[in-house]
Image: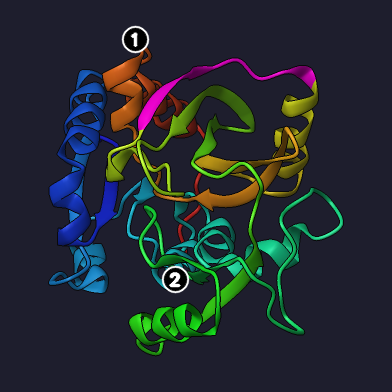
Amino acid sequence: MKQRCWILYYMEDLKKNRRFVDIITNKLKEKNILTKVILLDNENIEEQLKKSIPDIVVNRSRNYVVAEWLEQKGVKVLNNSFVTKCANDKLSTYRFLKDQIDFMPLLEAGWEYPCVIKSRNGHGGNQVYLVHDETEKDKAVRQLDGEKYICQRFCNEPGKDLRVYVMGGETVLAMLRQSKEGFKSNYSLGGSAEKYILSEEEKDIVYKILETMNIDYGGIDFIFHDGKLMFNEIEDAVGARMVYENTETDIIGAFADYIISKLGDNIELNL
């Protein structure tokens, strides 16, 4: 019987990530593995399970509740529900990693300017605001429109950051992103990107995170302060456009190989 892999998405994200699905699907097809995209917007996952049972699920939806439910059924999910839950709530991430790695302090007891206000569950550089005074703070909070947020001290080297792609507890490559203008350096927002070689000290910082979080495939983002890396966030459903446009690394193909290796694991289902 052919093995089955599901990829979970919401339609909005799928439109931006066709390359991911195509590469995974083609690679797995070579190994006679069936791939099915499940859109959580309009498909009942419980009904889908009645039709066929996946051997593995790649969760690109950022929905940890669905991941937890599948895991309770005995299905292996990449990334696991804990990683998805923690990575998609910045406050939870910082609290989990507190005293393990350095990050810009959270301003929980009072306001200092300049500071950065971020939605707790935003990604891709969206819902991130640099504020210099009370007026800008109030405007940012209004734009968040009721979203939960955090406030963080501003770094002294804005306009650049570092994304480290990780897979199966190892680093794959790092990309330095720099903005053309403004303080946000996200590639999707027009920033430039180039390959970056991690120092041994920087690798140690990454591996401290990987020792505590079992990330199958994701990105760990850092900003720079006083010439050093400061942890910023974890991208659970990480994008790879800048990798393909600026390097020769087939990172999604490598993840497909990783999925294939995980399909060799024994999975006991409890449906």
Say whether residue 207 is visible.
yes
The residue segment tinted magenta is 192-200
Residue positioned 64% across, 45% down in the render? 214
- Answer left or right for 72 relative to 113: left
Colour setting: rainbow
Q: Is mark 1 in CB contact (under 8 Å) with mark 2?
A: no
| Residue 248: assigned label | 1
Q: Quadrant of the N terminus?
A: top left
Q: Is residue 238 above or below residue 165?
A: below
- In the displayed structure, would residue 112 be above or below residue 130? below
Where in the figure is residue 70, as x and y percent of width and height?
42, 64
The label on residue 57 is none
Q: Residues within 10 Å of mark 2 (few under 14, many from 20)?
A: few
Give the residue number, with chain letter if any, for mark 2.
69
Picture layout, residue 164 above or below residue 145: above
| Amino acid type, residue under disc 1 in the picture | Glu
Does residue 131 show up magenta in the picture?
Answer: no
Quadrant of the image containing the C terminus: bottom left
How far across and down, in percent of the image, does residue 245 sit? 27, 20
Q: What is the x, y in percent for residue 241? A: 28, 31
Q: Which comes before the other along the chain, label 1 or label 2?
A: 2
The answer to whether residue 217 is seen in the rendering is no
Q: Nearer the viewer, residue 138 or 168?
A: 138
Secondary structure at numbered mark 1: loop
The mark closer to the camera, 1 or 2, is: 1
Up/down of 19 relative to 157, above or below: above
Using the rendered view, name the quadrant where residue 98 is placed: bottom right
Secondary element type, mark 2: helix
